Amino acid sequence: MRVAAASLAPRALEGARRGLVLSLTDDEGRVGLGEATPLPGFSPDTADDDERALAELPGALGAIGLPGGDAATSTAAPAILRALEPLSSRLRGVPAARFALETALLDLVGQRLGLPASACLGGHRRAEVQVNGLLATSAALPEMLGSARALVARGVRAIKVKLRSRGDEGFARDLEALRALRREHPSIELRLDANAAWSLEDAPRRLALLAPLEPRFVEQPVAPELLHRLGAQAVPWAADESLAAPGMPERLLEAEGCAAFILKPAMLGLLRAHDLGRRAQERGLGAVVTHLFDGPVALAAACELALALPRPPLACGLDAHAGLAAWPAIRIPQLREGGRVAASDRPGLGVGPWTA
């Protein structure tokens, strides 16, 4: 299979954010979609970087060999990686562009084989994955508790809370809000995200104070380059931003106290995220796939990644979000009612033709 044509459709979003939808047309006229929507202030790349990386693709890409043997259990990842080898220097440092390109190629492979992208990615085809809800302590307490009730009423069983306050006084306020949340929902799975805001000195004390609330883990308690030094604590912790640092995933796979990898394909690339999830699960760690508040193509790809992991992931951050309103109203077939993502019976990503 060869890519005969490529095009990019830019999309202006809220503030300075901009997204790009990549369309790749193969030699039989099928169109595969990918998306690059880096998050300013968080992603290492910009939309301008991604646009340059994704220019003039047809002549630069190698041929894509389709998986041999039993198509239902074969993975297209090696063939896609080989096709991307000529672009290795161009794709360095632009993970959103790599995510878009890998997604579009996987979409094409799935359409050629008549299989969903998840089956082509990992040789697996999980029926469904639970999603987690998202709250933040920056909201007023009555608002936060009301949002939690709405999530539980939808069937959501896990809630992630972003800890927005800073300093000891702010942490004390967050702690009181979390106690109120736990009183109302004693059986919900609670996860917390410190957004790398704590020091190595503060983290053990704060984790000990959180322990009575029985959170499953706290995401990224300290700076990405320090996380492997945290060690086992009163509450387990999970790696998020640290996974993008060279060599850090390998350290974290061996680190005491690490409970899970948070996989953002827009920050890691689709195939890298899948590989890290597989390796984490092999070591007994949890895996959580989450979006970057990006558009419908990226969200569909992240859903397929979660469905492709060798073992069931933990509830994933794949719920529909408000930022989708800035994009064309395209149905994401993997999103279902009841707080879950389910396998689509459509080949590839299943999102259909792109209309700007």
Image (cartoon, rainbow, N blue to C red):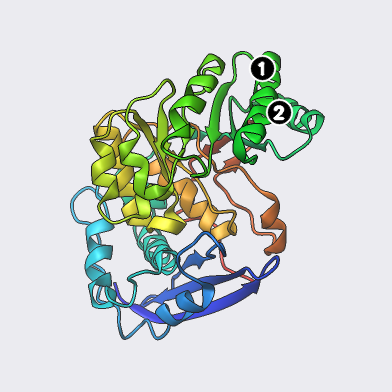
Which of 126/39 is in front?
39
Near mark 2 (Cα within 10 A), the count class, few <14, some 14-19 or many ≥20, is many
Which numbered disc covers residue 148?
2
Residue 281, compared with residue 35, is above or below; it is: above
Which of 318/253 is in front?
253
Q: Which residue is drawn at 31% across and 38% down?
A: 229
Residue 149: x percent and y percent?
A: 74, 25
Which numbered disc covers residue 185?
1
Q: What is the secondary structure assignment of the residue under circle 1?
A: loop
Q: Residue at x 47, y 65 (%)?
A: 34
Which of 229/135 is in front?
229
Q: Which amino acid is tagged 1? A: His
Residues tagged 1 and 2 counted as in contact (Cβ below 8 A): yes
Quadrant of the frame with the C terminus = bottom right
Cα–Cα gap, marks 1 and 2: 9 Å
First of labels 1, 2 by sequence position: 2
Which of 211/88 is in front?
211
